[in-house]
Image (cartoon, rainbow, N blue to C red):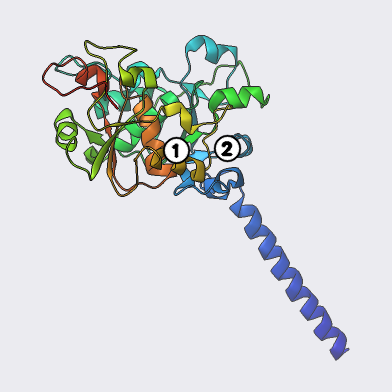
Amino acid sequence: MKTGSKFLKGFASLALIALVAAVAACASDSSGDTGGAASDAGITDRGYANSSRLVSATWLTEHLDDDNLLVVDLRNEDDYNAGHIPGAVRLTPGTTFQTEDANGVPGMLPSADHIASALSAIGAKPTDTIIFYDGSSNLWSSRALWALDVYRHADSRLLDGAWNYWSAHELVSTTDATAVTASSYAFSGSANTNLIAGWEEILASVDDPSKIVCDARSPEEFSGKDVRAANGGHIPESANVNWNRAVNAEGEFLPASELKTIYESEGIQGDKVVFTLCQTAVRATHSWFVLQELLGYQTVKVYDGSWVEWGNRDDLPITTRG
């Protein structure tokens, strides 16, 4: 009887341990846990410096019911109505994340209050994990994420491949509008202006080998063949890496090793201060995301005025060489 008693007690202890482990495993994978991006194997296997800012379509399909997760669709209203990710709410990115500044430069970052008002209208909360997607390989989504980083929203991420990938793989979608309860969103703390560069800082970098401008426009814009301002061309000593070289045919970001080769081959290295620009700092934020988050470059800033400011001034240096 004593031997049997010990066996039963030992068996009961093992069963209890197994039960506790099972409960813990379930808890770590519960629908309320939005911190699971780090376990998104499809992303972490690519070797990014920070994989937590990017989620795969597979991960999102498994977490659509998570508490405090807000999916934001940045496409136009017609596209949204034709089909969107279940539960997604819509924002118009051009009016939410860009505005004309006091000097008449279009496409500049609006005030914190302006963006907070738009977030309130879709029911966002400061505690939400906000996942952006668009229809163009995260082009507008990166602008939205950068804007929220400037104003210090705690957790915002991009959907890898965006809507094009989601739709092409026939993942779950709906045409039903998402019911929205407005909130009173407010940013806390001061803006992170270290993510923004003005023209004065760009000008000072031209003759500084420790700094480099990464021009995310097309080669035709860079060379001055495609002119979208009073003047065509580029900033002297800048390097051209078209933003779309960072994604594959399905709009997914390339692995870190491939991204590193692309940028370093153009002299854009992690030991330099890097300024990104394009026409109105949308493509520039896409390159900023790649360099800062995926490759882990220490200092990357978006020149928010970009070519719409620089190319329309006659007192700043421009070249079509190189």
Amino acid type for the residue under numbered disc 1: Ile
Mark 1 residue element: helix
Q: Is residue 214 visible?
A: yes
Residue at horizontal 22 percent and vertical 38 percent from the top:
193
Number of dots carrying numbers: 2
Corner quadrant of residue 113: top left
Camera sees residue 218? no
State the residue position of label 2. 56
Residue occupied by mark 1: 262
Give the Cα distance between marks 1 and 2.
Answer: 23 Å
- On-image quarter of the N terminus: bottom right
Q: Is residue 257 left or right of residue 274?
A: right
Task: Identify which residue, 292 or 72, lies in the foreground.
Answer: 292
Residue 185, quarter of picture: top left
Q: Position of residue 5 (x, y in %)?
A: 83, 84
In primary-sequence order, the first of circles 1 and 2 is 2
**Tag 1 near tag 2, CB within 8 Å:** no
Q: Residue at x 18, y 37 (%)?
A: 205
